[in-house]
Structure formats: structure tokens, C-alpha cells
Image (spheres, helix red, strand yellow):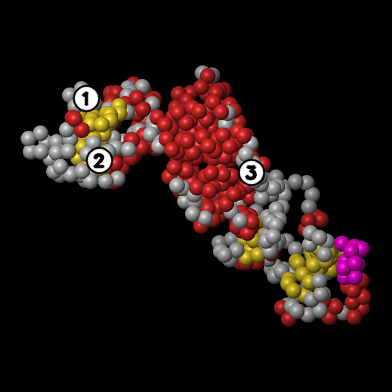
């Protein structure tokens, strides 16, 4: 399984029960996040609630930020927060050639949306329709928004995503037609 | 419940959804019709909020202006809102709506139980609320039939008319609701008793999400799907939906009204379905099942059609009066000895003329008490269809006394249980 496949197994829509069944090692770090998660050790709730509760709901009952929850679980499995839709990147910086600060035309911080349990996908897609060729769109999230990056890459956009020093994930999109 | 569903935010969401559909070019005519209908119901200040949100979300201004045009036309009364179709009694959409009312009743009962669990720390009260939730959830599992009629009978026609988006999205939502309901019901298989804390967790993460999904689906059906279907499906297509509905069944409601489509050649709601099941107004069965039923009922039947021809008899294990298949197709008058033919003739004439409907006899035959009764069979319009002879040996039944309340299998010496 590639890094990008793995990252797709842990998203806000992932159901907690099947995830713990597949990766039992996630149980201990999960329990540390919130005392409320002791519930998941209850055999009855494990068979019922865990089967249908998504990480988004789990974050809410534990009063844990969705970003913290996702990053903790992904970190435990050693999934890198790097995401790139293409192999070509600058040998020195490791970043793709099309990514330059002066090309960033629009920036969206989707952290509040994600914490409220909403998906920024429609908003981002609608913004990207209006993005001029050669311009770059920046999306800021608390964790790598893997399904969104996957969807954008399918729309013929180059995608590059990295975690910056403040811990936030910055993803950059640029139309594929614009080749440097 | 209704105030929960028909709030301003939901209306705005719906309006936005319709405009975005229009923007995507999805079935524009149908969407336009729905849009006009919804615009007619949404207060002007709410429309303004939606327009502002759409512009902020990046919808091209030209699209928003189009919406303004439609909206002002609605306000001026240029658009005839009275053209919105409604479903007559018994129509498949009318049945869906009535089912929704019955579903809402269960949802509001659930909501009352949720409140008890949220607020009460009194274990017996919580136990009682959980028991009530269990009953309501079991009733709600009937919703599968409501969804299957949409998926298997209505969606294929929508797709034929080029409307593919809403059916696909809805089907996905149906499956989510089914999974939540299934999990909710399974809870009671895993546990006989729930602690207050377990009950609260289950309410918030399983029971309530299931109920919310159902309530949300009712809103989407009644605001988008059904009006769109009424505008799209032909009378002939509705007739097909209607005719096949019984095979899937109904949800918490038994339709009382029969619906007759206009301008469509209709066949009775009976016949043989594609799956080879014999469809009757109150259910269906295969010929094998029907044969087993008729040969098991504790009396003998013989059926003579309206032309006095013997058409059918049951083949129970112990017929009182022997019948062999040589009599099929023969005139009933020829099956009786000459001394009783005039009685047969008299009964048939009285039945055909409508003077009489039943003719009972009882006799002692070889130590047994035998009851024989003739019934006139008629269709809904009262037309004579034929005569049914019902004979039964009542010797054992007449000898019964007291009560038999405990299970005790009737011993059948002829066929020992293996």
C-alpha cells in the first residue's frame, strides 16, 4: 500500500470500529486523547457505536480537535504528511517548479469549517473553476485533506501538500496546463 | 416534527441545491419547475441571503442574476403556481406521503424517548425509554420497503428521463440509513439491559443519527423528489409503479384508496409478475405455494365458473366427496345424479340472478357430521363469476369443549413427524 492509499484510510469520514479492528495499535494512543474514549472499550458500544461512528463524530464526543485526532492516528501508523501529484520536483527545495509565493492568487483556511464538521470540497472546487492558468490556490487545513487532494488531482490540477512549522498543512493547486 | 423539518435554513439549503443543479445543467426543465415552486414558498429576505451566499461561494454572477429574474417573475405573479401537480388519493406519491406521516409519528415518539434518556438519571425511567425505542425502531425497519419502492420502481423511470443525479445520491443515503437502523436494532441483540451512560452514547451516536437521516430524507423526498417525479413520469409509468408496489409492500401504512390512471389501458391489479408470482390485491405467492395453501386448508373446495363448467377442485388428503380430474371442463349439471340436478339448477339460477348468495346444507354421513355450503362469487361490480362449493367434516370441531391454551401438537397418525 502506498503512502497516499494509506492516508485515505484515515479521514474524518472513516468509521472508528473497522479502523481499530484493522490497526489495534491505534487503541492506546486514542485512549490518551480523551477520557471519553474509554467508552470504546465497552464491548457493547464497540459492537454498535464504533461500527457506525465516524472520526468526525468521535472527535466531537471526546472534545478533541479533528486535526489532532487525525494527525495522532496517522502519526501512529507512520503515514507521512507529504502529498504530491507528480514526480517532478526541484532537487534543492523538494517543491514542484510551479509553486512560487508570487503566484498564489487565493488562500483559504478551512480549519474552522473542518472543525465544525463541514467539507470544504465544494467551496474549493468552485474556487478552482475560476483560477487562472499559472496561478496557484492555497488551502490551509489541520491535517492532510487526502480525499480532497485526490479529487482535485483528478480534475487535472497539479497538487503539492506539506506541513509547515506551525503544524498546519498547506496544500497548493495549479492547473496542469501550465507547465513550467 | 414539521417545525424541525420546515425551518428556514432547510429551505435555504434546498434553494441553493436547486440553483447549483441548474448551474450544472442537470435536467434544466425539471429543476426550473422545482425552483419556481420553492421560490414561491421562500420569503424574499431568505432568497436574498441565499443569493449573497452563492455569490460568496463563487457562483458566477450571471447565474445569480438568472435566479433574480425567475424570482421577480414569481413575485409579480407571472408564474402560475397553481400548476404544481398534486397526487390524487391512492396514487404512488400519495402513498409515499402517507407513509411519511406514519414514519414521522414514530420519529416523534423516538424523540420523546431520547429526551428522557438525556435528562433522566433514573434507571427505571431510562430502561422504559430504551424499551420504547426498541419498539419504535423495529417499526421503522419497515422503511426499507418505502426505499425499495423508490429504488426499484421510481428511479429507473427517472433515469430513463435523463435524471440520474438525485436517484444516485438518494440511494447512497438510503444505504446509510439502513446501516444505522440495522446497527441500532442489533444493539438489542447484544444487550438485554443498557446503563444510563450506554443509552446516552447510543442515542447520540446511533439512534439519533438514524432518526435524523430518516427525517432529512422525508424533507428531500417531499421538497425535491416527489414534485420532480410528478412533473416527469407519465401516467403509464405511474401505473407500472402502482401495479408493482404490492410486490414490495408498504411501510407502516396500508393504502385504502385505489388509483385509476387516466387515459391508460389498465389491467386489474392481479396477474403473474415477472418473477412468476401470482399477484393478488393483498399479496402474492408462487403457484407451488398457492397449491400447498389450497390443499392444506381444512375443507374441500370445488369451483364452477359462470358458464357452469367445473374448473378446479382442491386435493386435500381426505376429501369428503371424491373428485377426479376427469370432471374438469364438464358442465356441473352432468356431475350430479338426476334426482338432485334440479336443486343444483335452482341454486345456480338464484346466484346468477343475484337473489341469493349462500346455500348451506348439513348431513350425517357414515357417522360424521358434514357441512356443505355453496357461495356465489362476484367481482367488485357485483358480476357473477361462478360458484364455490365448500365442504367440511365438523365432527371433531363440534365435539370440542373447554379450552386448549397450551401448545400441544395435533397428532397426525397418517404422517408421522420425522
Q: Is residue B282 above or below residue B63?
A: below
Q: Which residue is mark 3?
A: B84
Are there few (<14), some (14-19), or many (20+) residues within 10 Å of tag 1?
A: few
Q: Chain of mark 3?
A: B
Residue positioned 48% across, 23% down in the render: B196
- Label 1 or label 3, whichever lies nearer to me, is 3
**Dividing the picture into quarters, in which one does residue B368 lie?**
bottom right
Quarter holding the N terminus of chain A is top left
**Dividing the picture into quarters, in which one does residue B81 lie?**
top right
Q: Secondary structure at mark 2?
A: loop
Counting from the top left corner in percent of width and height, residue B136 is at: 58, 35
Q: Which residue is mark 2?
A: A133
- What is the chief secondary structure element of the magenta stretch? helix
Counting from the top left corner in percent of width and height, residue B398 is at: 81, 56
Q: Secondary structure at mark 1?
A: loop
Q: Marks 1 and 3, Cα distance to the nearest angstrom?
A: 54 Å
Q: Is residue A95 above or below residue B324?
A: above
Q: Is residue A159 visible?
A: no
Cβ atoms at labels 1 and 3 below 8 Å apart: no
Q: Is residue B275 visible?
A: yes
Residue positioned 47% across, 31% down in the render: B51
Per the rendered image, the range of residues in magenta is B348-357
- Label 2 or label 1, whichever lies nearer to me, is 2
Amino acid at each position: 500500500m502506498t503512502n497516499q492509499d494509506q492516508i485515505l484510510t484515515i479521514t474524518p469520514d472513516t468509521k472508528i470500529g473497522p479502523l481499530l479492528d484493522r490497526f489495534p495499535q491505534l487503541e492506546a494512543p486514542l485512549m490518551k486523547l480523551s477520557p471519553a474514549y474509554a467508552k470504546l472499550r465497552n464491548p457493547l458500544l464497540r459492537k454498535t457505536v464504533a461500527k457506525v461512528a465516524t472520526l468526525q463524530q468521535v472527535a466531537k464526543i471526546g472534545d478533541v480537535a479533528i486535526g489532532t485526532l487525525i494527525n495522532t492516528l496517522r502519526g501512529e501508523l507512520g503515514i507521512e504528511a507529504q502529498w504530491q501529484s507528480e514526480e517532478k520536483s526541484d532537487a534543492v527545495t523538494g517543491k514542484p517548479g510551479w509553486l512560487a509565493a508570487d503566484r498564489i492568487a487565493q488562500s483559504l483556511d478551512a480549519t474552522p469549517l473542518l472543525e465544525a464538521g463541514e467539507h470544504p470540497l465544494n467551496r474549493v472546487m468552485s474556487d478552482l473553476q475560476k483560477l487562472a492558468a499559472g496561478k496557484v490556490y492555497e488551502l490551509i487545513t489541520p491535517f492532510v485533506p487526502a480525499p480532497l487532494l485526490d479529487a482535485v488531482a483528478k480534475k487535472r490540477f497539479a497538487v503539492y501538500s506539506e506541513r509547515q512549522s506551525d503544524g498546519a498543512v498547506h496544500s497548493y493547486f495549479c492547473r496542469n496546463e501550465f507547465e513550467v | 416534527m414539521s417545525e424541525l423539518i420546515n425551518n428556514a435554513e432547510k429551505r435555504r439549503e434546498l434553494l441553493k441545491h436547486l440553483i447549483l443543479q441548474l448551474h450544472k445543467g442537470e435536467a434544466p426543465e425539471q429543476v426550473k419547475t422545482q425552483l419556481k415552486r420553492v421560490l414561491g414558498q421562500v420569503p424574499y429576505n431568505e432568497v436574498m441571503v441565499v443569493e449573497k451566499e452563492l455569490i460568496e461561494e463563487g457562483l458566477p454572477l450571471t447565474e445569480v442574476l438568472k435566479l433574480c429574474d425567475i424570482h421577480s417573475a414569481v413575485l409579480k405573479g407571472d408564474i402560475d403556481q397553481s400548476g404544481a401537480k398534486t397526487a390524487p388519493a391512492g396514487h404512488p406519491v400519495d402513498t409515499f406521503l402517507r407513509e411519511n406521516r406514519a414514519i414521522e409519528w414514530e420519529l416523534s415518539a423516538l424523540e420523546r424517548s431520547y429526551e428522557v434518556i438525556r435528562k433522566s438519571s433514573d434507571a427505571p425511567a431510562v430502561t422504559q425509554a430504551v424499551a420504547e425505542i426498541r419498539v419504535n425502531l423495529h417499526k421503522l425497519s419497515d422503511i426499507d420497503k418505502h426505499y425499495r419502492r423508490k429504488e426499484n420502481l421510481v428511479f429507473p423511470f427517472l433515469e430513463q428521463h435523463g435524471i440520474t443525479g438525485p436517484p444516485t445520491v438518494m440511494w447512497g443515503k438510503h444505504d446509510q440509513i439502513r446501516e444505522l437502523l440495522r446497527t441500532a436494532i442489533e444493539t438489542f441483540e447484544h444487550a438485554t439491559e443498557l446503563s444510563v451512560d450506554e443509552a446516552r452514547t447510543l442515542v447520540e451516536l446511533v439512534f439519533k443519527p438514524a432518526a435524523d437521516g430518516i427525517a432529512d430524507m422525508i424533507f428531500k423526498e417531499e421538497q425535491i423528489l416527489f414534485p420532480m417525479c410528478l412533473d416527469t413520469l407519465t401516467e403509464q409509468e405511474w401505473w407500472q409503479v402502482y401495479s408493482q408496489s404490492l410486490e414490495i409492500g408498504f411501510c407502516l401504512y396500508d393504502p385504502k384508496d385505489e388509483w385509476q390512471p387516466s387515459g391508460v389501458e389498465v389491467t386489474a391489479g392481479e396477474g403473474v409478475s415477472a418473477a412468476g408470482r401470482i399477484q393478488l390485491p393483498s399479496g402474492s405467492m408462487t403457484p407451488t405455494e398457492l397449491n400447498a395453501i389450497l390443499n392444506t386448508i381444512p375443507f374441500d373446495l370445488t369451483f364452477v365458473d359462470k358458464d357452469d363448467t367445473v374448473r378446479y377442485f382442491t386435493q386435500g388428503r381426505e376429501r369428503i366427496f371424491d373428485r377426479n380430474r376427469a370432471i374438469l371442463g364438464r358442465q356441473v349439471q352432468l356431475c350430479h345424479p338426476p334426482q338432485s340436478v334440479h336443486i343444483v339448477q335452482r341454486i345456480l339460477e338464484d346466484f346468477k340472478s343475484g337473489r341469493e348468495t349462500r346455500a348451506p346444507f348439513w348431513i350425517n354421513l357414515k357417522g360424521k357430521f358434514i357441512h356443505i355450503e355453496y357461495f356465489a362469487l362476484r367481482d367488485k361490480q357485483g358480476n357473477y363469476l361462478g360458484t364455490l362449493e365448500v365442504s367440511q367434516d365438523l365432527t371433531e370441531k363440534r365435539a370440542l369443549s373447554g379450552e386448549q391454551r397450551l401448545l400441544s401438537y395435533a397428532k397426525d397418525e397418517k404422517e408421522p413427524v420425522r
